[in-house]
Amino acid sequence: MKPAPFEYDDPQTVAEALDLLARYGDECKLLAGGQSLVPLMNFRLARPGRLIDINRIDSLSGIKRDDGMLVIGAMTRHSAVEHSTEVAGGWPLLTEAVGWVGHGQIRNRGTVGGSVAHADPAAELPAAFAALDATFRVQAKRASRLIGWEQFFVSEFTTALAPDELVVAVEVPRPQPGVGAAFVEYARRHGDFALGGAAVTIKLDAGGHCEAVSIALLSAGPAPVRATSAESMLRGAIVDQASIRAAAVEATRGLRPTADLHGSTEYRLRLLQTMTQRALIKAAERAKATP
Amino acid sequence: MTRKISIEINGRLAEGEVEPRLLLADFIRDVAGLTGTHLGCEHGVCGACTVQLDGRPVRSCLMFAVQAHGHRVATVEGMAPDGDTLSTLQQAFHESHALQCGFCTPGILMSMEAFLREEPDPSPASIRAALAGNLCRCTGYQNIVTAVRLAADRMQSS
């Protein structure tokens, strides 16, 4: 037995979970897929006094369309997103991003809501949601609210969620027709945390000018980063090698990714530029191929 | 505080009264007595403890036993049809020398059995990608890829 002892509840409904969160707040931790929390507990780096396991709440899983938007329930497993034809058809950036999450065995348990609430700066889905301007549906016993990705991700492993709040779903707006998207990252080994990565969407006009673009970076700072100045540089410009290269350099301006065993800050900046460049090239090719 | 739980493992009910912090892997080994499931890293990296939960491979070191209450679990002990015969995949591992020390093998068999159900005619590249979640420090993986492909051939022709 590895983890320290804890009290355990497994509510069957969202209302029961919200009751428990209202009662215990800071003393408890929500257990979603557990693929990040349980390793921390096995090492006893995390010792929550109480776990509220939301795996038995069926209404929190599922992928559906709502008024054109994609709505992904918080307890939807990564593998369900990976294999969803709905997601692949309208939001291929998510299909591509989720394939980079851990390994198949991890994706069978890990959840979309767990990934965003954990807010690991190297995580794939938060960056993809940033590129797609997603919004999180959050509930507490006292009130419900919508939080845009930009307000939601505060810092490393830190979100705008209050201790009594639960992420119930992610809303992803439908990309415009003709948008091309790409997700690329680099990790030392398959399934490891990304040393750097980029999630990109781009739309071109008939003359090859950039009509709309979004560039989000992972492992670039304490939270997912949108490279807004690089986006405005590219908007209206002819999308070619030179403009893509310039935008990729601009995307990392002002960033200071933390150096560690696997790479210095300088290395990581170069890596982020390369990832941005590759993602832009791939996304632009796909935009051209999309009717 | 303990909980009474029952988990269907390889078609048989395993019951126990356990602390919520008991990992599924430890329930399988210590309560159900099925020690074919091995524990390597105990933080989800090595894949040795991989079992199938409702038919899908998962890390049994990253789940609590209480979470599997009412669910179906498959472990390596359930693979062989009887005491004298190996399953097609196990037989292919045996013949292709796809194991040396054998510590990682139960997890790899659990992953690959589910993989072949989803992808009955996989390319070597696809087998390698599916193997990425299981570490083996003996074989160099070459013979594991060969064995999975051999099993796929035999399953398709039978």
Image: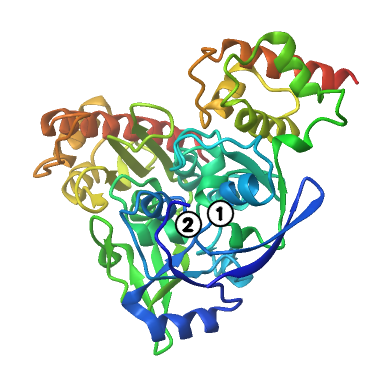
Left/right placement of residue A196 relative to residue B100 reads left
- Please identify the residue farthest to the bottom as the structure is shown: A142
Name the residue beneath numbered marker 2: A112
What percent of the width, then of the height, locates residue B122?
68, 22
Q: Are marks 2 and 1 in contact (CB under 8 Å)?
A: yes
Regarding mark 1 in the picture, which secondary structure is present there? loop
Residue A84 seen in the figure? no
Q: Tell which of B83 and A102 is nearer to you.
A: B83
* Mark with earlier residue (2, 1): 1
Residue A117 seen in the figure? yes
Quarter occupied by residue A194: top left
Given the image, what chain letter belongs to the residue carrying mark 1? A
Left/right placement of residue A172 relative to residue A46 reads right
Residue B158 tag number: none
Q: Residues within 10 Å of mark 1 (few under 14, many from 20)?
A: many
Q: Residues within 10 Å of mark 2 (few under 14, many from 20)?
A: many
Residue A77 tag number: 1
Given the image, what chain letter belongs to the residue carrying mark 2? A
What percent of the width, then of the height, locates residue B28?
64, 47
- B50 versus B69 height, above or below: above
What percent of the width, then of the height, locates residue A200?
35, 43
Left/right placement of residue A222 relative to residue A33 reads left
- The answer for how far apart the CA atoms under marks 2 and 1 are is 6 Å
**What is the three-letter code of the residue carrying label 1?**
Arg
Q: Same chain, marks 2 and 1?
A: yes
- A171 versus A216 height, above or below: below
**What is the three-letter code of the residue carrying label 2?**
Val
What percent of the width, then of the height, locates residue A287?
44, 38
Regarding mark 2 in the picture, which secondary structure is present there? helix
Residue at point 55%, 57% (across, down):
B64
